[in-house]
């Protein structure tokens, strides 16, 4: 007599749950994306440097949503890390439906005075790893005819940023790349969205050296509503999403200012920020 298999098990075998891959998932916006994706029915792959922090988030997700989570501890400033991630997830690749490139960091200071290697590592993480991961996962998303890529940029993308010159430049790249890929891939069933948060209360500020700034404190949003805005925009198929009405207005207004005027204004803001810290 043929052994009976419970209906729910048959469904699980026939229709694997879609998977969301989230980088920078150990804290802040990335952690919130993990919870949001899991609550929306996705199993999640959590990627960051700290395995202990990732396991803590994974436990939260599993207890809160019942969804499965996989932890992959990787330093994405290593040029070989994106390929290693793809290899690690070979068994899940066909089920990946969402890629959220959230990992990134910034540094506050003069370009010629900040550590050269740290600035190169910033470009590697914010630009090269994001580009590499998007390219590596794109074929699988296209094959599904349904996929989403959320590339986390910043409102910093919309103007030059003296005193954070490299960081602002990396985020401008993210918006430009994502906007182009949005146009290329939408006919193939893949949505690519550039997400531009403003000041957000996360560990990013401590790394960048701006956590004590009064200017930051007065304008910062909490990570959960920021992540929710990004996720809703992604699922709505938008090319660029800015978190917060004030931030969206400022991003819009920068289109009408001469580039060097933007740079001078940004420099004054940064100088005030350093004095207020």
Image: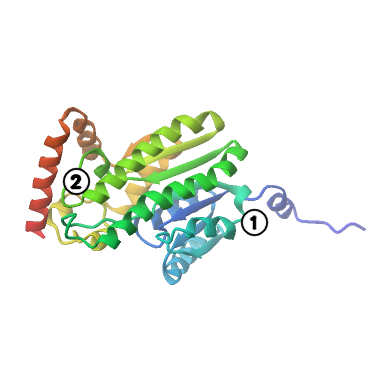
Compute the Cα span from label 1 to label 2.
42 Å
Residue 112 in picture, x, y percent from top left: 17, 56
Q: Is residue 237 in sight in this rendering?
A: no
Residue at position x 23%, y 57% from top?
A: 107
Q: Is residue 73 in sight in this rendering?
A: yes
The residue sitting at the bottom extreme is 52
Judged from the image, the secondary structure of the residue bearing numbered disc 2 is loop
Judged from the image, the secondary structure of the residue bearing numbered disc 1 is loop
Horizontal side of 246 relative to 264 (left or right) equals: right
Q: Nearer the viewer, residue 217 or 211?
A: 211
Quarter of the figure that contains the C terminus: bottom left
Residue at position x 16%, y 60% from top?
A: 113
Q: What is the number of the mark on residue 233?
A: none
Horizontal side of 132 relative to 208 (left or right) equals: right
> What residue does disc 2 label?
161
> What residue does disc 1 label?
91
Would you place residue 77 above or below residue 263 in this image?
below
Residue 271 in picture, x, y percent from top left: 9, 52
Residue 66 in picture, x, y percent from top left: 55, 59
Labels 1, 2: front one: 2
Quarter of the figure that contains the N terminus: bottom right
Residue at position x 20%, y 42% from top?
A: 160
Residue at position x 46%, y 54% from top?
A: 22
Q: Nearer the viewer, residue 263 or 16?
A: 263
Residue 272 in picture, x, y percent from top left: 7, 52
């Amino acid at each position: 007599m043929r052994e009976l298999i419970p209906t729910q098990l048959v469904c699980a075998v026939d229709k694997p749950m879609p998977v969301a891959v989230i980088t920078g998932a150990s804290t802040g916006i990335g952690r919130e994306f993990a919870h949001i994706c899991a609550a929306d029915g996705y199993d999640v792959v959590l990627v960051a440097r700290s395995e202990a922090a990732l396991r803590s988030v994974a436990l939260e997700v599993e207890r809160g949503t019942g969804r499965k989570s996989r932890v992959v501890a990787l330093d994405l400033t290593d040029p070989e890390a994106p390929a290693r991630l793809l290899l690690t997830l070979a068994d899940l690749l066909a089920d990946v439906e969402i890629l959220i490139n959230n990992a990134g960091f910034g540094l506050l200071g003069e370009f010629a005075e900040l550590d050269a290697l740290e600035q190169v590592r910033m470009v590697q993480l914010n630009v090269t790893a994001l580009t590499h991961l998007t390219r590596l996962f794109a074929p699988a998303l296209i094959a599904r005819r349904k996929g989403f890529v959320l590339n986390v940029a910043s409102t910093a993308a919309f103007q030059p940023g003296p005193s954070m010159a490299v960081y602002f430049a990396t985020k401008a790249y993210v918006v430009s790349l994502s906007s182009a890929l949005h146009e290329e891939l939408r006919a193939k069933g893949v949505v690519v969205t550039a997400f531009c948060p403003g000041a957000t209360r996360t560990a990013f500020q401590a790394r960048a050296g701006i956590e004590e700034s009064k200017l930051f404190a007065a304008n910062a949003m909490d990570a959960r509503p920021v992540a929710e805005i990004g996720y809703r925009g992604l699922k709505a198929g938008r090319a660029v999403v800015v978190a917060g009405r004030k931030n969206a207005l400022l991003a819009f207004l920068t289109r009408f200012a001469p580039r060097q005027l933007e740079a001078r204004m940004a420099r004054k803001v940064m100088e005030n920020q350093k004095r207020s810290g």
